[in-house]
Image (spheres, rainbow, N blue to C red):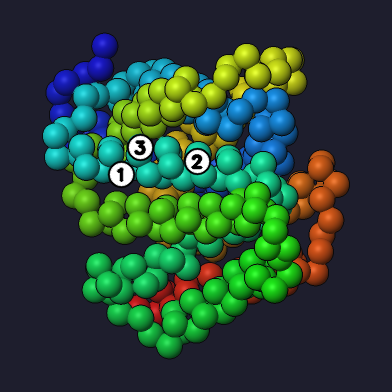
């Protein structure tokens, strides 16, 4: 049973303690695991409907987080003050974002999908300017423009066959997903946390899993799932590893390493996604993808460096 008592400062500090080498190791693992997960998701949606996949992934992740936090004696009922961030992270980041990108990878190459989904930091800048009243200097504004030009290169409306509705839908969903995640980031920054991110993670993921499960049962035919040993392995990778472990690992990394280091390093995720998709799924490494990735990466670097100066 979860503990209903609030965490003591000593217990919270002990739970957050991690050495720098361990944090760096965790960061490298997250970059590799999340990057490889893009072609993995592409494979899974070939065996089961997308909403059912999201529900399965989140259910496995929630169970894993419950076991993990209980083992660390960090499993506690959330405070009422944390309910907004549970709804925001569980509903938007874990729920809607995951659902949109999973639907999108049915129509968009996994490598390209990974790049577009990681444009989220670019949208955070204008949202933070409006809602958080943060200042935007020339470097940050320039980074935003460079990054958006990379998005334009990837989206490239002139190169689209506008009669191909599924392709347009997939690219549009990825852009909406990135914007939704950005809105969630702004809300998380404004929220005054009572519990730690790790303590709230199981409840957030259970909320997302519950909504996804209901949606899957209502909208999809479960008999269309092509159960096989390969699918089970892919789901195990997605649930406990790419969802539960990586979420916990990023929380740990964010508390142990400087934000500038983390934000720049996570740019390796779409790079790994692009390369792994090329190796595993034989997706071509086109000049458009490479140019878009370079511009987005350059924009994010400029934004991150401007943060360092302020």
Marks 3,1: beta carbons within 8 A: yes
Name above or below for residue 187 compared with residue 151.
above
Say whether disc 1 or disc 2 marks the residue closer to the N-terminus.
Answer: 1
Name the residue that disc number 3 marks.
90
> Relative to residue 183, is residue 153 depicted above or below?
below
Picture disc at residue 301? none
Image location of residue 207, percent across then percent down: 34, 29
From the image, tell me which residue sits under label 1.
88
Q: Residue furthest front?
A: 163
**What is the spatial separation of the Cα atoms under label 1 and label 2, in whole angstroms?**
13 Å
Residue drawn where x is 53% and y is 70% of the image: 300
Circle 1 — which element?
A: helix
Q: Which residue was labeled with disc 2?
A: 98
Q: Is residue 116 visible?
A: yes
Instruction: Residue at 43% x, 88% y: name it.
Output: 138
Image position, residue 180 (x, y; %): 41, 53
Front-most of 33 and 44? Answer: 44
Q: Quadrant of residue 124?
A: bottom left
Considering the numbered disc 3 on the image, is that residue within a helix, a strand or a loop?
A: helix
Q: Residue at x 16, y 33 (%)?
A: 79
Query: How many numbered circles does the render carry?
Result: 3
Left of 113 or right of it: where is 277?
right
Q: Label 2's element?
A: helix
Image quarter hosting the N terminus:
top left
Residue 280 in the figure: left or right of residue 271: right
Percent across and percent down for residue 213 are: 44, 23
Q: Looking at the rendering, which quadrant does residue 232 occupy? A: top right
Q: Residues within 10 Å of mark 1 (few under 14, many from 20)?
A: some
CA separation in Å, label 3 and label 1: 6 Å
| Dot 3 or dot 2, earlier in sequence | 3
Q: Residues within 10 Å of mark 2 (few under 14, many from 20)?
A: many
């Amino acid at each position: 049973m979860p503990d209903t008592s609030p965490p003591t400062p000593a217990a919270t500090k002990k739970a957050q303690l991690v050495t720098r080498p361990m944090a760096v190791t965790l960061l490298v693992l997250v970059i590799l695991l999340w990057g490889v997960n893009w072609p993995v998701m592409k494979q899974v949606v070939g065996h089961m409907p997308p909403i059912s996949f999201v529900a399965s992934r989140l259910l496995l992740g929630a169970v894993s987080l419950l076991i993990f936090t209980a083992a660390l004696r960090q499993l506690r009922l959330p405070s009422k003050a944390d309910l907004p961030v549970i709804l925001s992270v569980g509903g938007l980041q874990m729920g809607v974002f995951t659902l949109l990108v999973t639907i999108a990878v049915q129509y968009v190459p996994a490598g390209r999908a990974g790049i577009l989904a990681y444009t989220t930091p670019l949208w955070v800048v204008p949202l933070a300017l409006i809602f958080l009243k943060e200042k935007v200097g020339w470097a940050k504004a320039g980074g935003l423009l460079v990054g958006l030009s990379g998005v334009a290169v990837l989206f490239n409306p002139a190169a689209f066959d506008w009669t191909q509705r599924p392709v347009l839908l997939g690219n549009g969903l990825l852009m909406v997903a990135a914007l939704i995640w950005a809105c969630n980031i702004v809300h998380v920054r404004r929220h005054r946390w009572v519990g730690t991110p790790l303590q709230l993670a199981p409840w957030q993921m259970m909320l997302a899993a519950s909504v996804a499960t209901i949606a899957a049962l209502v909208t999809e035919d479960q008999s269309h799932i092509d159960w096989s040993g390969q699918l089970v392995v892919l789901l195990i990778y997605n649930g406990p590893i790419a969802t539960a472990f990586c979420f916990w690992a990023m929380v740990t990394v964010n508390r142990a390493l400087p934000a500038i280091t983390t934000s720049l390093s996570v740019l390796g995720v779409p790079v790994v996604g692009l390369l792994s998709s090329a190796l595993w799924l034989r997706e071509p490494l086109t000049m458009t993808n490479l140019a878009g990735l370079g511009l987005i990466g350059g924009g994010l670097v400029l934004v991150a460096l401007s943060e360092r100066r302020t």
